[in-house]
Image: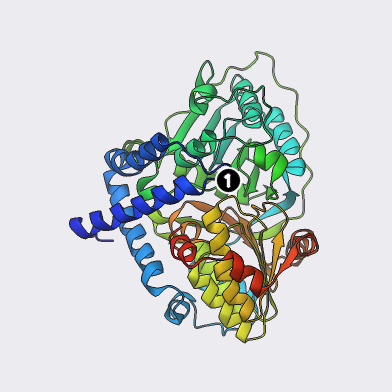
Amino acid sequence: MTTPSCRPFQLYRGSILLALGLVIGCSHKKTGDIPGGLVARSVFRCTVGASIKDPMGSARIGGVVMRDRLRSLFLGNASVIRRAGAGSKTLAAGTGAGGEAFETLLDREKLPPRTSGSVEFLIDGRNFFPLYLKALKEARKSIDVETFIFDNDDFAVEVADVLRAKSRELPVRVRYDRLGSDQAASVHAKSMPANFTPVENMQDYLTDGTTVECRRTENPCFRADHSKLHLIDGDTAFVGGMNLGREYRYEWHDMMSRVEGPVVQDLARLYEERWCSDTLWRKLKGSKAVKKPVVAEASPAPVAAKPMKRQVPLRVLHTDACQGRQQILKATLLGIRCSARRVWIETPYFSCDEIVSELEAALKRGVDVRIVVPDKADQKIMDKNNAADLKKLIDKGAKVWAYPGMTHLKATVCDDWVMYGSANYDTLSQRINVELNLATSDPQTVNTVATRVFEHDFRAGTRVTAAMAREKGSLFAEMVGDQL
């Protein structure tokens, strides 16, 4: 990719940074009041700081960001996006998503090859975090953590304390996004105990007096690492949408999965790639040697072999602007385009015009399009944007539900194919951020998500009418939201 000429690129980036600064300052998830100093520091780190640490990577990301934001800005909902972005001509629209023919299509479209693994879905914090903490405490070889937000509240500190303690026994590495975590730490969940004093710097808290290796990712052009990946002993992984913080433990609706089997090796290689990708120096040097853990002299007790769980074909999909990967968007467009019976989507943020356009085409074919969004999203601008885009689809026959409170869950079912993970249905997740999803055509897995997630949330939610969406939506919010 060629680097755009300096002056147009600087003008464009300056306008985007100004808009993002205003949006961030006005729409934060908890109170809407992020300190101005934090916004200023974030702007500096995402431009000057990131460019100094990795000039080549920042230039590449800047080019991708400019191209894709201009695409969203000028093409919007135009049908040309659907024709250009839908992908393959080798499987006709409405043929059916899922099954071997569809998976072969994804192979031909050069998406990552299928591997295999077991999948156990853990819905909401009460089902995920106790099991996650237990897995951390019982780890015997290594712990690798990648998350968008490592908050500084009481629950995040509880997780940090387990990681600190385990670092006395085995290698522990933590990678979290600087921009996302700084913003989350600047305001606090309403439910946080009044007598708790938040940690000032989570990186320092994790590493002081321990052998924890901790890296905060850089954010050139506001690109974030939005993935959630936790590896335990190299044979168990947790993948999904939950960050480390009080909202995800106690307040929001979300989903993680525990996976085991060969897919974990693919996820471990992905972690290694990202661990040494943040700066030019790390790219050249590679991952530094992991510190030798302090272990007891006595030999550990033998561990019984884990029983073999049911293995299903799995495909690991990414978004990464720096690597030119937009696999999640490509798979999503293909899934919707090939769908013949249903497209069910749940997401907190719905603002990708390419996906809206493809859904409109599916509705014309008579596909059952259903979408679940939060009744009240954590970001006001995205709440209004959701309503504006959904109004278009409701008018064409889509069914939309507002989940009570905040759903942060991201999942898609197209006929007999399911995809879930960290990626929202917005420009950032589909084209710019670092994201991680898993997908499969395994009938039992598809049915599990359709039943436990979608059918449950349809019953729990309130049906949204066109009038309700019109009242809540905003043209300005849609214009801004398309850039987020």
**Of residues 101 and 468, the one drawn nearer to the viewer in this rendering:** 468
- Residue underneath mark 1: 228
Q: Quadrant of residue 150?
A: top right
Task: Please state, as top left, top right, bottom left or bottom right, where the N terminus lies in the image.
Answer: bottom left
Name the spot of residue 287 as percent of width and height, x first. Answer: 42, 35
Residue 67 vs residue 400: left or right? Answer: left
In this view, which residue lies farthest toward the top?
297
Q: Quadrant of residue 30?
A: top right
From the viewer's perspective, is residue 228 above or below residue 293? below
Q: Residue at the location (75% across, 30% down)?
A: 303
Name the spot of residue 291 as percent of width and height, x first. Answer: 49, 23
Residue 116 vs residue 317: left or right? Answer: right
> In this rendering, does residue 427 appear at all?
yes
Residue 165 vs residue 138: left or right? Answer: left
Q: Quadrant of residue 246?
A: top right
From the viewer's perspective, is residue 126 above or below residue 301? below
Q: Residue at the location (42% across, 80% down)?
A: 80
Q: Describe the element under mark 1 as helix, strand or loop.
A: loop
**Of residues 216 and 253, the one drawn nearer to the viewer in this rendering:** 253
From the viewer's perspective, is residue 243 above or below residue 332? above
**Of residues 15 and 450, the one drawn nearer to the viewer in this rendering:** 15
Q: Amino acid at mark 1?
A: Lys
Q: Residue at the location (41% across, 49% down)?
A: 22
Name the spot of residue 353 as percent of width and height, x first. Answer: 49, 70
Label 1: few (<14), some (14–19) or many (≥20) C-alpha neighbours in 10 Å: many
Question: How many numbered dots are placed on residues in this image?
Answer: 1
